[in-house]
Image (cartoon, coloured by chain):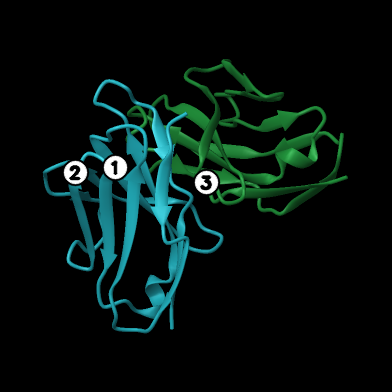
Chain colours: A green, B cyan
Amino acid sequence: GDSVTQMEGPVTLSEEAFLTINCTYTATGYPSLFWYVQYPGEGLQLLLKATKADDKGSNKGFEATYRKETTSFHLEKGSVQVSDSAVYFCALSDGGYNKLIFGAGTRLAVHP
Amino acid sequence: GAVVSQHPSRVICKSGTSVKIECRSLDFQATTMFWYRQFPKQSLMLMATSNEGSKATYEQGVEKDKFLINHASLTLSTLTVTSAHPEDSSFYICSARVTATNEKLFFGSGTQLSVL
């Protein structure tokens, strides 16, 4: 079945460092891909999404490009801030938002 | 944005007891709510989908008699873990969808259940 694999955390960075969180997927169809973020004490929030190959999703300085050839959707940010400390979940869906399939989440800790 | 409130955030209970987790949409009506479970270092897995006023649809491998879901109103869904065992210890998250045509999902902050 469909699945999502993302890098294990925690990822610890200094402020202004470059961030990459790897995400790869397995799917039989042509899924939509998502990144969700969960800040401490809050619910998951949609960070960005891409619905077809070569699409780039972006939001709040984060970017991810839908790479069909490598079945990847890596999350990147050029300069992280302490406020970016959170858990990031990669997810896919081939049926809208109903059947979201998540990765295990990657905890990011950014230190001043 | 829309807010989903989930309570409690953390609960510890004895084996054999039942635990109820509430999920409320605070500023919108949720026709559909979803319940997820996450074991340590594993993916967030969909357990069941509930539509207001009807029986929940459970994913394969999820025991409907053990995980009772009630969605009696457009703003409240509850998950009751009955006769809890230590292997039920997990992180449970709910999410809510606004309407049938608006596919955006809003998530609760999760409940960490520990069964002793």
Characterize the local packing of mark 3: few (<14), some (14-19) or many (20 or more) Cα atoms within 10 angstroms: many
Image height check: is A30 above or below A101? above
Q: Position of residue B32 (x, y in %)?
A: 25, 38
Given this view, does label 2 or label 1 mark the residue nearer the observer? 2
Local secondary structure at mark 3: loop
Label 2, label 1: how far apart the Cα atoms are:
11 Å
Q: In terms of depth relative to the viewer, which is nearer, A46 or A104?
A: A46
Q: Residue shown at 66%/53% (left/top)? A: A8
Decide: is B93 above or below A66.
Answer: below
Q: Residue pushed farthest front?
A: B27
- Neighbours of disc 2 within 10 Å: few (<14), some (14-19), many (20+): some
Residue lying at 86% horizontally and 36% vertically, measured from the top left: A17
Q: For this view, does A29 lie left or right of residue A87?
A: left
Q: Is residue A44 left or right of residue B78?
A: right
Question: Which amino acid lies under the numbered mark 2 shown in the image of this protein?
Answer: Ser
As measured in the structure, the alpha-carbon distance from the residue carrying label 3 to the one carrying label 2 is: 31 Å
Q: CA distance from mark 1 to mark 3?
A: 20 Å
The amino acid at mark 1 is Met
Q: Which numbered marker is on residue B33?
A: 1
Q: Position of residue B112 (x, y in %)?
A: 47, 64
Which residue type does callout 3 highlight?
Answer: Gly
Q: Which residue is mark 3?
A: A103
